Each structure stands twice: as C-alpha cells, then as structure tokens.
Image (cartoon, helix red, strand yellow):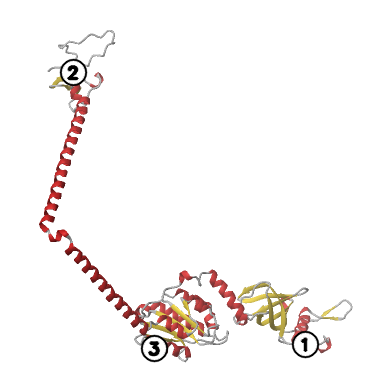
C-alpha cells in the first residue's frame, strides 16, 4: 500500500467554534505555542484527510477483551497498534477471536484525544488462511462435542410405525416435495404436518429453534411422533442457520426424535450432528421414518407362512405322540397297568407309615431323656433330701436373716408343702461356725408360729 508524504502545510486549520476553541499561550521568548487540544485536532485532521480509509491490516491478535464493545491489539515482530470494534460491528463477526490468532482487520485510523491514543476502529475482522464461517463452525463443534451434544447415548430411537410427522422447512423448499412424495409412496396413510420456517437469512435460526421447541412442548396434544428438519443444498453461508447454537440447543432438548437432512450429501451442519439421525438427503430422511408398505406386506406374508409351518409341525408332533401312546403295552392292558400302580401306591403307604412310627419312637426317647435331665436339676428334687427355702409374703426368697423383720409373715417351702410363720423380735445374729449349736425343732428364734 502506497502512502502519501506528510505535508504540514496542507493540514486544515482547527475549527474555532465551541467544539475546538483556540487557546493561545505565550512562551518565554514571546512566540505562539499550540495547546494540547490544538495538537490533538491537528493529528486527528491529518489522519482523517491524509490516511486512506478503509485500511486492511494483517497481524497477530492479542489483549482481546469483550466489554460488549471489543478491545484488542494487532502486533507483528516490531510494533503494536490498539484497536476498537463497537458492538454493532462485533455482532457480525462469524468466529470467536482467540489470543495469538492471525487476522485481517478492516477499519479506519483515528486519534482519541482524551486518552492520547491513535487507534484502528474496526468494521470487519476475518481470520487469516481460513474463512470466518469455517472457523466458527469448527469452534462450535469443539464446544458442543465437549458438552456431550454429539454423544450416541443422547440419541433417541425412531418410532417403528409413526402416524404423524412434523416437517420443519420452508413451504417453497424443494426438499419438502421430496419428503411428501417419498412418504406417500412408502405409506399412503402417513400424515405430514408442515411447520413453515425460513431456512436462510438472519431470522432463519431463531424461527427454526422456536419451531422445534414448540413441537417438543406440544407434541402430545398435536400427536406428533417425530420431526424431519430439512432443506436443499447451498453454500456455507446459505446453510449457516443450521450451524447456530440456538438451533443445536433446541434439537438437543427436544423430546421428539429429530431426523435432519440439510443440503447435499457432502454438506455437514451442526444441526445434523446433534440430531438423533443424520441423513444425506430429504428423501432418505423420509425413508428412515416412514415404513415401506410393500416391505411390511411381504413381512406379514412371511410371518403367516412361518405360522402355518409351525402349526403343521406341532400337529405332526402331537399325532406321533398319540400313536406312541396307542402302541404302548399298558394302553392295551389297562387292568394290569392299574394293578401295578395300586401295588406301588400300597408300598409307598407302608414305607410312609413305618417312617412315621420310627420318628415317633425316636422323639419319645429324646423327650424322656430331657425329662430326666430336668428332674436332676429341679429344685423340688433337692427338697426331697431335707432342704427347704423361705419366702416373704410376695414370694421373694429370703437369703439372709437381714431380709426378715419382726412381725413379718414368712413361708417355708418343704418337699410336701409349706409352713407359714411369723418372725418375733429381731432375728438372732448368726454365730461363728466353730461355736454354733445345732438348732432344735422347738427353737422359737428360728421358726415362728406354725
């Protein structure tokens, strides 16, 4: 690019109005000096009238900041220039700027006086070596793949015998006629519902996403079994509506199976990658969803033939079994067969009775043995040897003289009955074993009134 030499004499004098008031100052030697504002206006005027616009600048993108307006820098091996891209222009950029990316920036050079900065104000930003749309497509694919949008685990199965399908496309699209013709040929009873949307242009992505969302929300009331999303071929720009994130989100969240066929066989869109099934053409999309009447009739004929063959084989098998029974010896001599069965039943009855008797005998012996063990450790058995035990009125055993009080009614338990007594006075303290005397039966200190 050729630049004109800078000529200060050709600079336009700054405006003397309210927006650019001349301010003069005197130097020490009396000569006139420019104010900062005057110098800023001179720079701005030189850039406006002596630098060709628009400029196309190639460089490495750095310091990118998205503050609704975009702020970034372009640099090469030796220099850096700051750039600004206002939100209205940034909204038209078809890729996501990344640090270190080589780009071509188109815009005008201007001087921003309040900050003393010469900046490139951008109207357009493109990647170097690859189209902006192609780069944006790759970036969004990576983003959606990481989020699981393309995973097979999220794909829904197609209905086996759908009754009503929704076709999301343009009413004037040739793809619609392909779908209608294929569906009527394969299954005349299928019902198709057209959802007319724009399939190209600025409003297309929003209309497509809104149509899919409404079908998903109301499919029960509408009786829709699946969705065909389709359009004919075109350039990447023509098909770009099917690469927008809002369309991918709508397909991913749809409760209905979505079959997508966008463009020609060589075209691939993000909508097709997210859909439950991708088809190369609208005709193939209809064929994958609509059953083939001729094939189904042939299948029914095959099932009928298999059923007939199965019934015939079953009848032959049962006839063979019946013939075998008729030929069997016992069938010809029923009395002998019944006699043998009776003898077998009598023998089994005898064995059962013997087993029962043996079981009862064994259990009786076990009970007698346990009874003897219980008698051996029974307290009543101890009483027959001359021992006794004493309780109070509540039946609690008195284990010590301390457990009895004067006037208390006590009961002595013997082997053949009980004796009730009343304690008189305090019980005598037990004496030492060496000095103890054998009590007599009449000792009132030991036994109370009988």
Query: Which sits in the foreground, 139 or 153?
Result: 153
**Badge nearest the viewer, 2 or 3:** 3
Q: In the image, residue 374 lies at what x, y percent?
A: 21, 28
Identify the image quadrant of residue 352.
top left
Viewer-side label of 1, 3: 3
- Looking at the image, which residue sits at the far left? 335
Q: Residue at image x 18%, y 23%?
A: 381
Q: Which residue is mark 1?
A: 50
The residue beneath circle 3 is: 185
Residue found at the very far bottom of the displayed protein: 172
Q: Which numbered disc, 1 or 2, marks the residue that appears first in the sequence?
A: 1
Q: Earlier in the sequence, mark 1 or mark 3?
A: 1
Q: Is residue 145 above or below residue 3?
A: above
Please tell me the numbered disc located at residue 142.
none
Q: Earlier in the sequence, mark 2 or mark 3?
A: 3
| Position of residue 24 measured from the top left corner of the image (x, y, whole percent) | 80, 81
Circle 1 residues within 10 Å: few <14, some 14–19, many ≥20:
some
Give the total of numbered labels.
Answer: 3
Give the residue displayed 21% in from the left and 20% down from the top: 405
Look at the numbered discs 1 and 3 and tell me whether their residues touch, using CB distance below 8 Å.
Answer: no
> In the shown orientation, is residue 343 left or right of residue 259?
left
Q: Which mark is residue 385?
A: 2
Q: Is residue 173 visible?
A: no
Question: Is 123 drawn above or below residue 80 in the view shown?
Answer: below
CA–CA distance in space, label 1 to label 3: 70 Å
Q: Is residue 435 visible?
A: yes
Q: Position of residue 314 (x, y in %)?
A: 25, 70
Mark 1 or mark 2, whichever is nearer to me? 2
Which sits in the foreground, 375 or 291?
A: 291
Secondary element at image label 2? loop
435 lies left or right of 173: left
- Note whether 436 is above or below 324 in the view shown: above
């Amino acid at each position: 690019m050729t630049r004109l030499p800078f000529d200060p004499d050709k600079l336009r004098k700054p405006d003397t109005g309210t927006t650019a008031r001349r301010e003069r100052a005197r130097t020490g030697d009396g000569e006139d000096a420019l104010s900062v504002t005057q110098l800023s206006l001179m720079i701005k005027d030189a850039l406006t009238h002596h630098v060709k616009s628009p400029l196309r600048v190639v460089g490495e993108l750095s310091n990118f900041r998205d503050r609704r307006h975009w702020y970034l820098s372009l640099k090469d091996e030796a220099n850096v220039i700051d750039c600004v891209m206002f939100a209205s222009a940034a909204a038209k950029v078809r890729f996501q700027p990344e640090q270190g990316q080589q780009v071509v920036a188109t815009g005008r050079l201007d001087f921003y006086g309040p900050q003393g900065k010469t900046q490139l104000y951008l109207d357009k930003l493109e990647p170097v070596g690859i189209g902006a749309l192609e780069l944006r497509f790759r970036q969004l694919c990576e983003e959606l793949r990481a989020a699981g949008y393309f995973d097979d685990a999220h794909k829904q199965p197609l209905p086996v015998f759908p009754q009503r399908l929704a076709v999301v496309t343009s009413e004037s699209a040739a793809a619609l006629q392909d779908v209608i013709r294929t569906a009527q040929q394969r299954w005349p009873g299928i019902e198709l519902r057209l959802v007319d949307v724009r399939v190209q242009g600025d409003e297309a992505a929003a209309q497509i996403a809104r149509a899919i969302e409404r079908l998903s929300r109301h499919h029960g009331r509408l009786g829709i079994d699946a969705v065909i999303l389709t359009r004919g071929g075109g350039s990447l720009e023509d098909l770009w509506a099917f690469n927008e994130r809002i369309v991918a989100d709508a397909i991913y969240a749809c409760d209905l199976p979505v079959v997508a066929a966008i463009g020609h066989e060589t075209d691939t869109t993000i909508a097709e990658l997210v859909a439950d099934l991708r088809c190369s053409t609208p005709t193939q999309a209809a064929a994958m969803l609509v059953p083939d009447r001729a094939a189904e009739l042939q299948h029914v004929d095959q099932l009928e033939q298999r059923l007939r063959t199965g019934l015939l084989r079953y009848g032959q098998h049962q006839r063979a079994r019946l013939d075998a029974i008729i030929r069997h010896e016992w069938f010809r001599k029923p009395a002998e067969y019944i006699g043998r069965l009776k003898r077998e039943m009598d023998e089994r009855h005898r064995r059962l009775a013997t087993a029962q008797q043996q079981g009862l005998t064994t259990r009786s012996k076990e009970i007698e043995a346990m009874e003897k063990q219980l008698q051996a450790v029974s307290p009543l058995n101890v009483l027959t040897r001359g021992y006794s035990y004493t309780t109070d009125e509540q039946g609690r055993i008195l284990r010590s003289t301390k457990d009895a009080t004067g006037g208390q009614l006590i009961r002595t338990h013997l082997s053949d009955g009980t004796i009730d007594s009343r304690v008189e006075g305090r019980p005598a303290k037990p004496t030492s074993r060496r000095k103890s005397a054998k009590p007599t039966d009449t000792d009132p200190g030991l036994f109370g009134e009988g």
